[in-house]
Amino acid sequence: MRQLLLNQTCVFHLKRMAFRAQSKYKKRYRLTNDDDLVELILFADSSKDIDLRRNFMLFYINCPENIKDYLENNYNIHSPMEPYQSLGSL
């Protein structure tokens, strides 16, 4: 994601995800390393931890479209809200 710039809100939620992963799961991610950023996002996306999921959702909502496209095309990371969109018709 070196070629893509994250806004301050995205960075804030990434830091919160990294803190939660380290404090609860003893996983350490360096936010200056592109591979670690992707690993953190993948970990948060697959986690059942509500705090990680919440911060991932907030990260994703605040991401610019070009970063969402990059994550989707290169890493198959999609919106965390997709599974719940069908519930809107209830």
Image (cartoon, rainbow, N blue to C red):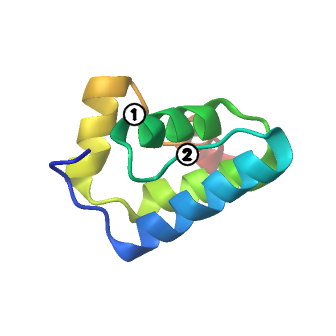
Q: In this view, does 88 lie above or below 86?
A: below
Identify which residue is drawn at 63% across, 40% down: 44
Question: How would you rate the neighbour count of disc 2 (Cα within 10 Å): few for under 14, some for 14-19, many for 20 or more?
Answer: few
Q: What element does badge 2 sit on?
A: loop
Residue at which label 2 appears: 81
| Amino acid at the residue labelled 1 | Asp
Q: Nearer the viewer, mark 2 or mark 1?
A: 1
Instruction: Report the amino acid beneath label 2.
Output: Met
Residue at the left extreme, as displayed: 3
Q: In which quarter of the image is residue 7?
A: bottom left
Q: Which residue position holds label 1?
A: 35
Q: As displayed, is residue 16 above or below residue 27?
A: below
Residue 53 rendering spot, x and y as whole percentages:
68, 48
Q: Nearer the viewer, residue 40 or 44?
A: 40
Left or right, residue 79 beside residue 19: left
Q: In this view, does 48 lie to the left or right of 82?
A: right
Q: Which residue lies furthest to the right in this view?
A: 24
Question: With 41 as the anchor, is 16 left or right in this view?
Answer: right
The quarter of the image holding the N terminus is top left
C-alpha gap between disc 2 and disc 1: 24 Å
To which quarter of the image does residue 57 belong? bottom right
Image disc number at residue 27? none
Residue 2's x, y, as percent? 21, 47
Q: Which of 2 and 52 is in front in this view?
A: 2
Q: Which residue is drawn at 27% across and 49% down?
A: 67
Neighbourhood count class around disc 1 (C-alpha, 10 Å): few under 14, some 14–19, many 20 upward? few
Taking the image as shown, residue 4 lies to the left or right of residue 53, namely left
Query: What secondary structure is found at the residue carrying circle 1?
Result: helix
Say which residue appears at 80% left-offset and 43% top-offset.
Answer: 49
Residue 11 point in image, percent of width and height: 44, 66
